[in-house]
Image: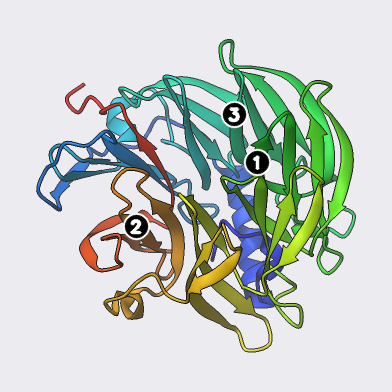
Amino acid sequence: MNSKQNIGQYPRRLLALLALACLACLASCRDNEDEIIPSTETPVTEGETTPVKGFFLLNEGNMGSNKASLDYFDYESGIYHKNIFPERNPGVVNELGDVGNDIQIYGSKLYAVINCSHLLEVMDVNTGRHIEAISIPNCRYIVFDKGYAYLSSYAGPVLIDPNARLGYVARIDTASLKVLDTCVVGYQPEEMVVAGNKLYVANSGGYRVPNYDNTVSVIDLETFREVRKIVVGINLHSMKPDRHGNIYVTSRGDYRNVHSNTYIINTKTDMVTRTLNLPASKLCPAGDSMYVYSTEWSHITNTNTISYAIINTLTQTVVSRNFITDGTEKKIEVPYGLAVNPETREIFVTDAKDYVNPGTLYCFTPDGKKKWEVTTGDIPAHIVFTNKQLIINN
């Protein structure tokens, strides 16, 4: 089961599995009985010196399995380190927890959002060691601004419910790691973008299927209150800024008759200025390009339609219908994660495969040819680059 996307997308046979997963989430406890599993090292390429020292990859793990895990790639050695969290944190039982939903770096800390375990795991970015776990129900994505972290939360349980409550954004002091305030937004909020003194929040309403939300909440960061909602498209999800004062936001559609789409919001006017008629599941900005992949699920055909694209953010037009140029996309069963190295412009795509077994990470050159691949944890999804090399022997 696809554990990241909101559960309104699933066919009925998978909803039964979701119910079992929810029970597993409730029944699972953080005990200390399991043996600590050491990380594994895989040389994947020759080492190189670059301002970007490496990246962390957060594997979601299948919902209800408590198998979220953390990998690290080191550019200097060219070695991929799989499952580094347990050995660095033997006192944190049950490892990272259930469903890793986002990972980001701010200052000297590494933040992992663990959705079904209802917590924000805070680690030292230099060592990967646990600092704090902050309890936030059904948390989803995290962004930062001026010493604060902003974390979106569905607020309620992991459950399809036509009466599911409004979500909120939590404001966290990154020094004290305390929740200072919350701001109510739309239903089941997802990704966010800070632009100027405003926080934009994509509301999905995924638990209220078929009555999805269709708005982006705009929060004034001085008052930390919602000041308006922008009507965009139903079941919103991914949201990324360009370098020209615009925000790109994706709609998952209803998985039946309303297709996935991509919209552009002007942050000066807070209005939708363009609809690209481009399906998108994940967005990744790099310079004046916005890289896109789509795995558009259909309840009618019970299949995913997979596509890749690049948007030129200067012209706001689609300039490529596939950034993989050597045919490797034919090997990728379910693209699930997307990242572009800001220095080298290497492109990274993860493959979740069957959502149960280990996935694969592919590294492509800037012109879309495969450079290397490596086996990851289960459901590899979220990548964050670091300019601080992880201490390997700690």
The residue under label 2 is 347
Split into 4 quadrants, where in the image is the N terminus? Answer: bottom right
Residue identifier under label 1: 193
In the figure, 123 relative to 33: above or below?
above
User: CA gap, disc 1 to disc 3?
Assistant: 9 Å
Q: Quadrant of the C terminus?
A: top left
| Residue type (three-letter) at the residue carrying disc 3 | Phe
Q: Which mark is residue 6?
A: none
Front-most of residues 231 and 125: 231
**Is label 3 in a helix, a strand or a loop?**
strand
Q: Residue at coordinates 37% horizontally, 33% vertically from top-left?
A: 33
User: Which numbered disc, 3 or 2, marks the residue that appears first in the sequence?
Assistant: 3
Indicate left or right for 336 with 157 as reference.
Answer: left
Q: Is residue 98 visible?
A: no
- Colour logic: rainbow
Q: Is residue 1 left or right of residue 23?
A: left
Picture quarter containing residue 332?
bottom left
The three-letter amino acid code for the residue at tag 2 is Ile
Residue 332 to residue 376: above or below: below
Q: Secondary structure at mark 1?
A: strand
Disc 3 designates what residue?
A: 144
In whole angstroms, how far apart are the C-alphas of marks 2 and 1? Answer: 22 Å
Residue at the image position 79 percent from the left and 64 percent from the top: 233
Crowding around mark 2 (Cα neighbors within 10 Å: few <14, some 14 to 19, many 20+) is many
